[in-house]
Image (cartoon, helix red, strand yellow):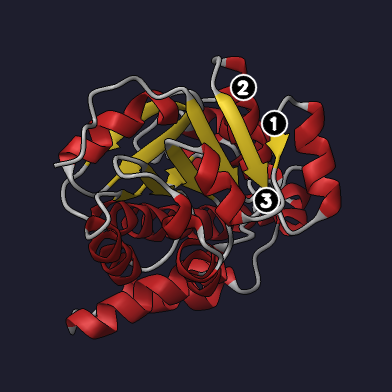
Amino acid sequence: MADTSNTVKRTGMIGLGAMGLQMARHMVAKGFDVAGYDIAAEANARAKEQGVRICGSPAEVGAHAEVAVVMVQTDAQVSDVVLSSGLLDRLASGAVICIASSVSPDLCRELAQAAATKGIGVLDTPVVLGQEAANNGTLTIYVGGEEKWSERATPVLAAFGKQVLYLGAAGNGQIAKTINNMLLWACMSANFEALTLAKKLGADIPRLVAALGQGSGANWSLSRWGKSTGKWSEKDMDVALELAQDAKVPVPLGGLVDQLMKHINQDKMKALLS
């Protein structure tokens, strides 16, 4: 059995975009020796300014890191980083890969099984609360995977997360993220519809939003009205609806939310406040 008792000092961050850069920055600030990689030269340059040691490939990050965090966009990119680009091959036994990207639970389970043969852990660790929380180091992180790997990686995740919540076996972190997002986009579409009506009726929307925050209709999306972008709603709802179809569970409200969110954007949300 791999030794997971020693304190982690060396970490990695693959994907240094808007979220990944902030996560890496917080790890540096907490004293970790952080190696990073991104396909974009400008992203690497920004990360280097924050104290991240820039590598030439995911494999090079793997040669350095005891815990490597992956924050890329798609299932295919995650699979490529872990398997095809050499990250898994270069990590030492006892290392942990944290998949912070929002991807399918099945992919996380498959990668966990592949890594287990090498004595390496894979956790799905998707994050919620958005860019502002990433900037502030106050993300909520949902964790799925073997508990021993969660215990090893938690001090690293806590560098950029206010709450690190262990939810059970591999895939459960991604399931939590998907369900969270279903509720988020349902609230956002309901808020948009209700506030559009309120504005048409002549309400002072900023005052109304503040008042509703003290009532039974309060929700996180409403409390940040005009700040959230709705950027990833289409991807998130596609994932949710595909999982529901595979599970043969009807989600008619989810289907409606998917359609409603296609015409809601930050400009339209901000316009209600003016």
Identify residue type, mark 1: Val
Residue 16, horizontal then vertical, whole percent: 68, 46
Which secondary structure lies at badge 1?
A: loop
Identify residue type, mark 2: Val
Q: Residue at x 16, y 52 (%)?
A: 169
Q: State the CA–CA distance, disc 1 to disc 3.
A: 47 Å
Labelled pair 1, 3 in contact (Cβ < 8 Å): no
Dot 1 corresponds to which residue?
52
Which mark sits nearer the N-terminus, 1 or 3? 1
Of badges 1 and 3, the one in the foreground is: 1
Quadrant occupied by the C terminus: top right
- Work out whether residue 199 or residue 35 is closer to the camera in this orientation and state it: 35
Labelled pair 2, 1 in contact (Cβ < 8 Å): yes
Which mark sits nearer the N-terminus, 2 or 1? 2
Dot 2 corresponds to which residue?
28
- Work out whether residue 19 or residue 227 is closer to the camera in this orientation and state it: 19
Q: State the CA–CA distance, disc 2 to disc 3.
A: 46 Å
Q: State the CA–CA distance, disc 2 to disc 1.
A: 7 Å
In the visual, does 117 lie left or right of 44? left
Residue 193, horizontal then vertical, whole percent: 55, 60
Above-or-below relation of 255 to 140:
below
Which secondary structure lies at badge 2?
A: helix
- Work out whether residue 28 or residue 252 is closer to the camera in this orientation and state it: 28
Which secondary structure lies at badge 3?
A: helix
Crowd tier of the residue under label 1, counting other residues whose Cα lies within 10 Å: few below 14, some 14–19, many 20 or above? many
Q: Residue at x 36, y 77 (%)?
A: 241
Dot 3 corresponds to which residue?
199
Residue 157, horizontal then vertical, whole percent: 42, 31
Which mark sits nearer the N-terminus, 2 or 3? 2
